[in-house]
Image (cartoon, rainbow, N blue to C red):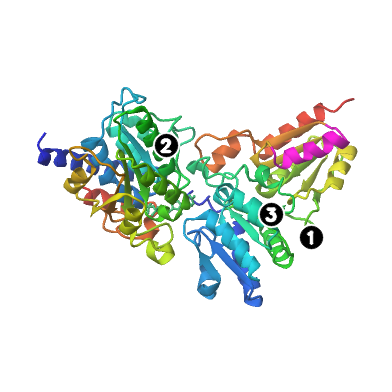
């Protein structure tokens, strides 16, 4: 699979936080089990498998079965964390996710690994950029996209305690821990990463730290950008979006996902009906060409400079 | 052509494919060399000893079709299509580079000779089934070949297609299973066992042949249409070795998507002669 990105000081692969946390939780709660599809390694569940061999169900390369088995395990009183490459977990097993998990309402935690375009050169079959659009309408599944290692660990702990379906979308791209005072993970709530009045950048997952860099770049030009880490895509923190629209008058959304039907779409749905403001939606317009993650980010402007450019554009579109 | 000559030609192509595929993987530092090497003798036999095609006319309606269901093994597929004349050797150098036609998984819109896009496992057999049904409907005499991994057969979609192919008595339909007994993380039998695989296909209405998937003579025999044709689809279980041809790669799951350093690359090139 994709070559490991060059190690950067202070950048961490969130799958490590996931693996540590699930092992800790499993230690204290025998109901916690893992379900995988030949994905022990890519899910970093080698340690879990060693410690709890009887609580790891590897169904083989069979995602539909995997998600159905997850629902059944929940029926049997287990707390299953179903972990697989998010492209196959959500795409291949979409009807199982809809009918067996969302509609039936089982207490299953779906953990999508290596989401977005993390698989780079392996191409669109292995990218998971449609998952937000697929899962958002399944309204009783909470869709959570941690931005860093800390948030990953907190989200996993919360999901284990919460009774109901959750999709946690992880990457394999190393990201730095965000610097936010008195941090507390609140599902369904946007996290204010930075205050600002001229524009709001609403980001999730791997894009949040880039938004922070963009805000620094903008500040040098006298533009004050608010940054919201929208770690929960569904349900959406509508109050935070309304406040952003009325207080800053322009919005940029950025996600490592297709721009249709994801975070940007959700924000646009809310604002267009309530407080229409200019929105620049950043992400991928559709299937992407061959290329590494770094090349794809650059090619589609998912960089601090690209975000700053979109912010200026959104501000420029404000009515005078 | 005499069979011995044909076997020699196929072996020569297969050797070239292994060397070229390993170079691509080495240069890109990406790829799936283990599964490339278990499949190369099968694919070389198809393209250089069995199939009817014209690289100048990739859409020729009467062409035999090859569907690479185990789409991750692009080193094997891309070198075969190149050697078959679909595109120049230069293209291989772009493997996985930005905007390359040689994506990590095959895309029919990028490359002539690719029949369908694969990568997610368990898609090739149903698509190939549709191609074979179309051939039956139109009375065409083309043959449809599909190569799957063995771990791949854990996907239920394969069994939906297998049942359908058996019921429809598709005599021009051939599935080759690359039975290297390893999947991504470990052995197929310790993950979700497939044996007895031959009995499973027979029960689904298929003819089954079990052969050594690196014995080119045996591959030519099994893949050639018998006089009078067949009245059932054929499943060839090709017993193979993942990483075949490079000592340190053979039968090692870690070489599923392992990539060589310079030293390993040099050793492999010395062995692949
Ligand atoms: C639907 C789906 N699930 C998971 C994967 C990830 N994956 C790629 S290759 C592979 C193992 C394939 O094993 P096998 O079919 O035996 O192929 P081979 O050993 O011949 O390479 C897996 C799990 C995938 N490509 N598609």
The picture places residue B19, in percent across and down from the top left corner, at 27, 44
Q: Is there one chain holding both mark 1 and mark 3?
A: yes
**For mark 2, what is the residue?**
B130
Q: Chain of mark 1?
A: A
**For mark 3, what is the residue?**
A102
Residue B191 visible? The answer is yes
Q: Residue A176 sits in which quadrant?
A: bottom right
**For mark 1, what is the residue?**
A183
For discs 1 and 3, the disc positioned in front in the rendered view: 3
Magenta: main secondary structure: helix
Q: Quadrant of the N terminus of chain B?
A: top left
Q: Nearer the viewer, residue B176 or A246?
A: B176
Callout 1 touching callout 2 (CB < 8 Å) = no
The image shows a total of numbered marks equal to 3
Question: Residue at (81%, 31%) from the top-left corner?
Answer: A278
Q: What secondary structure is found at the residue carrying circle 2?
A: helix
- Establish whether ligand 1 lies closer than 8 Å to the Cβ of label 3: no
Q: Chain of mark 2?
A: B
The picture places residue B30, in percent across and down from the top left corner, at 42, 47
Label 2 crowd (10 A; few <14 / some 14-19 / many >=20): some
For discs 2 and 3, the disc positioned in front in the rendered view: 2
Write down the region rendered in magenta. A261-277
């Amino acid at each position: 699979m994709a070559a490991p990105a060059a190690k950067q000081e202070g950048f961490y692969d969130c799958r490590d936080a996931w693996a540590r946390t699930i092992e800790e939780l499993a230690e204290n709660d025998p109901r916690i089990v893992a379900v995988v599809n030949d994905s022990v390694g890519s899910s970093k569940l080698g340690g879990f498998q060693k410690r709890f061999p009887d609580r790891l169900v590897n169904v083989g390369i069979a995602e539909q079965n995997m998600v159905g088995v997850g629902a059944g395990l929940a029926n049997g009183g287990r707390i299953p964390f179903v972990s697989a490459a998010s492209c196959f977990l959500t795409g291949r097993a979409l009807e199982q996710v809809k009918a067996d998990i969302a509609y039936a309402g089982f207490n299953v935690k779906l953990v999508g690994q290596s989401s977005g375009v993390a698989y780079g050169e392996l191409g669109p079959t292995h990218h998971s950029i449609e998952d937000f659009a697929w899962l958002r309408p399944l309204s009783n599944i909470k869709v959570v996209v941690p931005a860093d290692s800390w948030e990953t660990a907190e989200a996993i702990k919360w999901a284990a305690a919460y009774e109901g379906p959750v999709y946690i979308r992880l990457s394999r791209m190393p990201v730095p821990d965000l610097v936010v005072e008195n941090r507390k993970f609140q599902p369904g709530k946007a996290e204010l990463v930075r205050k600002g009045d001229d524009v709001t950048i609403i980001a999730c997952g791997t894009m949040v730290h880039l938004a922070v860099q963009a805000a620094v770049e903008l500040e040098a030009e006298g533009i004050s950008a608010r940054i919201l880490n929208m770690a929960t895509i569904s349900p959406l923190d509508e109050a935070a979006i309304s406040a952003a629209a009325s207080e800053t008058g322009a919005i940029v959304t950025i996600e490592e996902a297709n721009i249709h039907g994801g975070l940007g779409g959700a924000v646009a749905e809310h604002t267009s009906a309530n407080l229409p403001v200019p929105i620049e939606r950043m992400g991928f317009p559709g299937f992407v060409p061959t290329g590494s993650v770094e090349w794809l980010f650059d090619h589609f402007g998912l960089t601090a400079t690209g975000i700053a450019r979109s912010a200026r554009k959104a501000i420029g579109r404000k009515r005078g | 052509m005499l069979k011995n000559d044909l076997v020699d030609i196929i072996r020569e192509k297969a050797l070239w494919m292994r060397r070229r595929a390993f170079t691509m993987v080495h240069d890109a530092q990406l790829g799936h060399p283990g599964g490339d090497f278990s499949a190369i003798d099968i694919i070389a036999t198809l393209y250089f000893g069995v199939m009817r095609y014209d690289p100048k006319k990739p859409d020729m309606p009467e062409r035999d079709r090859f569907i690479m269901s185990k789409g991750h093994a692009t080193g094997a597929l891309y070198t075969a299509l190149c050697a078959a004349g679909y595109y120049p050797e230069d293209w291989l150098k772009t493997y996985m580079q930005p905007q390359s036609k040689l994506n990590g998984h095959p895309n029919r819109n990028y490359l002539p000779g690719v029949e369908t896009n694969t990568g997610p496992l368990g898609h090739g057999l149903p698509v190939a089934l549709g191609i074979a049904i179309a051939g039956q409907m139109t009375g065409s005499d083309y043959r449809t070949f599909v190569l799957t991994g063995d771990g791949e057969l854990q996907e239920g979609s394969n069994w939906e297609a297998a049942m359908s192919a058996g019921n429809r008595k598709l005599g021009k339909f051939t599935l080759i299973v690359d039975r290297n007994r390893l999947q991504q993380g470990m052995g197929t039998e310790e993950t979700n066992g497939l044996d007895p695989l031959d009995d499973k296909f027979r029960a689904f209405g298929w003819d089954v042949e079990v052969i050594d998937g690196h014995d080119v003579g045996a591959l030519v025999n099994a893949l050639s249409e018998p006089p009078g044709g067949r009245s059932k689809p054929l499943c060839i279980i090709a017993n193979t070795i993942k990483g075949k041809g490079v000592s340190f790669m053979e039968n090692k799951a870690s070489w599923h998507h392992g990539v060589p350093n310079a030293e390993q690359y040099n050793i492999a090139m010395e062995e692949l002669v």
